[in-house]
Image (cartoon, rainbow, N blue to C red):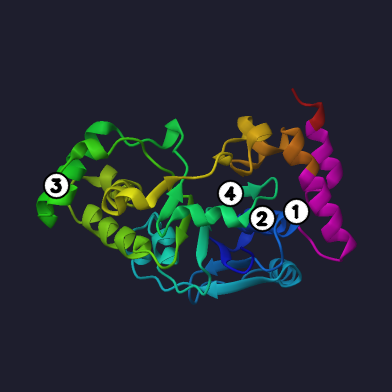
């Protein structure tokens, strides 16, 4: 289904743009040119570096500003992904990613049609879990506020999902539901910890609202560095976590050399020689 997918992610100026450059390079390496890549930045924010902008131009990455409907309400920027999901897209499907992701292989874009007008996400890993008690209390309070019988079962909280890797059909209600549910959670006066997790808690409500229009992300999506052998899309917290992984390390060397041959910078001061150094580490 080429031409019907947009991959998007937020980007920040300075060192944080490195992650977005690596992600964009991996998408261009493994997916057709018909897949659109959009990097979202804050409106009126500091400009991105010339190196990043020129690399994005070479890779065909569109840089857009997102409308901060919710973003400025929270100092920890938890609403960034929610606002981006609410942007306008021309494609049938959108894959919304955290910049700290890297595509490790190609995949059949037609598989996305299995989403059946809803959305998909991988399971969260344990570090990101909100306690069951917090989820249940949040759920029950939001149900009371909405007075919606379809949301009445706290048992539906269940498994938690990662808001940094989301695939959704733009014809679905996903972005509107996620935004309204996030606002409800944030305004529910359930304490700062729940506020900080508002988008994540809200995903549980969206799953319940969409019912059979939610599906687990395809196998291999959103895995962690220690699962690299099975990963299609890998997510990470620190560069050091992926530099010690042979499969990722080889790809980074390939990406850097390709960018250098074309006259662009991908990894800045980090060279293929530096990357190979991690081969010696246990």
**N-terminal-most mark, 2 or 1:** 2
The residue under label 3 is 141
Tell me which label, 4 or 3, sits earlier in the chain: 4
Residue contact at pointers 2 and 1, CB within 8 angstroms: yes
- Residue 274 within the segment the image draws in magenta: yes
Mark 4 = which residue? 100
What residue is pinned by disc 1? 267
Query: Marks 2 and 4: in contact by CB < 8 Å?
Result: no
Q: Please report the bounds of the magenta region as a residue range.
A: 251-278
Observer-side mark, 4 or 2, equals: 4
**Residue drawn 82% across and 34% down?**
277
First of labels 3, 2 by sequence position: 2
**Residue 282, above or below 36:** above
In the rendered image, residue 81, in percent from the top left (x then y), is placed at 44, 59
According to the picture, the residue beneath numbered tag 2 turns out to be 18
The CA distance from mark 1 to mark 3 is 46 Å
Q: Which residue is nearer to you in this view: 188 or 47? A: 188
């Amino acid at each position: 289904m080429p031409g019907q997918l947009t991959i998007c992610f937020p980007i920040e100026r300075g060192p944080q743009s490195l992650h977005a450059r690596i992600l964009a390079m991996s998408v261009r390496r493994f997916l057709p040119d018909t897949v659109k890549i959009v990097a979202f930045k804050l409106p009126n924010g500091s400009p991105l570096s010339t190196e990043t902008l020129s690399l994005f131009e070479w890779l065909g990455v569109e840089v857009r500003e997102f409308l901060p409907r919710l973003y400025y309400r929270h100092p920890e920027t938890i609403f960034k992904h929610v606002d981006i999901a609410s942007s306008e897209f021309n494609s049938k499907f959108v894959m919304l990613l955290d910049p700290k992701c890297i595509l490790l292989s190609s995949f059949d874009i037609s598989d996305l049609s299995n989403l059946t007008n809803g959305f998909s996400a991988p399971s969260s890993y344990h570090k990101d879990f909100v306690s069951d008690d917090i989820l249940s209390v949040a759920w029950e309070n939001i149900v009371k506020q909405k007075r919606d019988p379809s949301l009445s079962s706290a048992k539906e909280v269940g498994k938690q999902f990662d808001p940094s890797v989301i695939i959704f059909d733009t014809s679905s209600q996903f972005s509107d539901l996620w935004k309204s549910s996030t606002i409800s959670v944030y305004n529910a006066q359930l304490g700062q910890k729940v506020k900080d997790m508002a988008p994540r808690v809200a995903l549980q409500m969206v799953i319940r609202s969409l019912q059979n229009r939610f599906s687990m992300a395809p196998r291999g999506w959103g895995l962690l560095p220690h699962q690299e052998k099975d990963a299609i899309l890998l997510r990470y917290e620190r560069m050091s976590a992926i530099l010690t992984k042979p499969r990722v390390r080889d790809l980074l060397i390939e990406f850097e050399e390709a960018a250098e041959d074309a006259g662009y910078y991908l990894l800045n001061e980090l060279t293929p020689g530096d990357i190979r150094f991690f081969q010696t580490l246990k």
